[in-house]
Image (cartoon, rainbow, N blue to C red):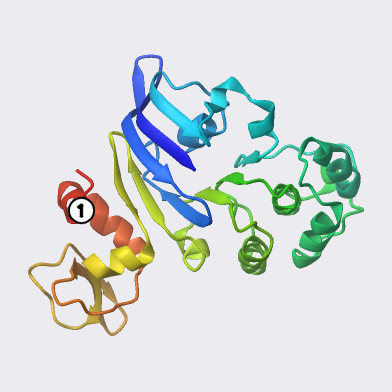
Amino acid sequence: MIKVDNLSFSYGIVPCLENISLSLEEGKIYGLLGENGVGKTTLLTLLCGLKKAQAGSISVDGLNPFDRNPELLANQYYLADQVAPVNAKAADFAASTGKFWPRYSQEKFIEIMKIFEMDPGQKMNAMSAGQLKKTYISFALACTPKYLYLDEPTNGLDIPSKAQFRKAVMSYTADDSVILISTHQVKDLENIIDPIVILDRRAVLLNASVEQITEKLYFDYGNTAYPDSLYTEPVPGGLLQVRPNTTGEESKMNIEALFNAVHSNKELIKGIFNNE
């Protein structure tokens, strides 16, 4: 389990995260959403120990990730948005580098590469940006880490590859994993991320499961405009509105509409979800 308490971090005199608190539980794939500059990437690098918290604390299974405990390092993987080409065949790179993760499986790496329709014998410095990203995603999943941090993993992937990514994540992650995916491409991941974390620089605006979200918010697809709507946008055939769910009706969440509703009503949303 990951527990973050009153975490703050600045770049010089420029604050990035201020007094952020949240908990991330095992067996879940979290979607980390937020506007540009709110500190999503910074949070990922703090969680995996690449940066040190300047105030507050981070606990991963009771350990401070910045202490670089070997047991924790062997049980986590951080995949940055930008990945580097390597002068090696993908299979050779994976086999040699995977030795640092005790649950790494070369067989699993090959299987995931096949899902992506990739050749494990191709040299990585001869790959396109999308092919290189798919190779690193395959390696990250093959390491079978308990804690997996993915920063914009679908950037650079074409439409078929995004579907393959979803299949790989759902098929090749352990039941006890905590997966945190930072993304702007919410439509790419809408069907696999649950819970949803929406980050602001000074607060976690939302950390809730899809079930909890649809219990408290109603996503209305109709023609009638409602005065209590937290967010409204025109869609073919009518309006998409996000409203407080006062009747307990079920609805299908639209993650982009949710994000816009949250950012337009920050304090109200925090009150609705008891996140004050």
Does residue 248 lie above or below 259 as drawn? below
Tell me the quarter of the picture where residue 118 sits: bottom right
Would you name the residue on which mark 1 appears? Answer: 269
Amino acid type, callout 1: Ile
Residue 220 as seen in the image, left or right of residue 85 = left
State how many labels appear.
1
Quarter holding residue 213? bottom left
Vertical placement of residue 182 versus 217, above or below: above
Q: Name the residue located 37 percent from the left edge and 61 percent from the top edge.
A: 209
Please, what secondary structure does the residue beneath circle 1 have? helix
In this image, 233 relative to 87: left or right? left
The answer to whether residue 16 is visible is yes
**What is the x, y in percent for residue 123?**
89, 46
Image coordinates of residue 49 in percent, x first then y, are 56, 27
Q: Is residue 39 visible?
A: no
Image coordinates of residue 246 in percent, x first then y, are 13, 72
**Which residue appears farthest toward the front when viewing the image?**
62
Classify 239 as above or below 259. Answer: below
State whether residue 104 is above or below residue 249.
above
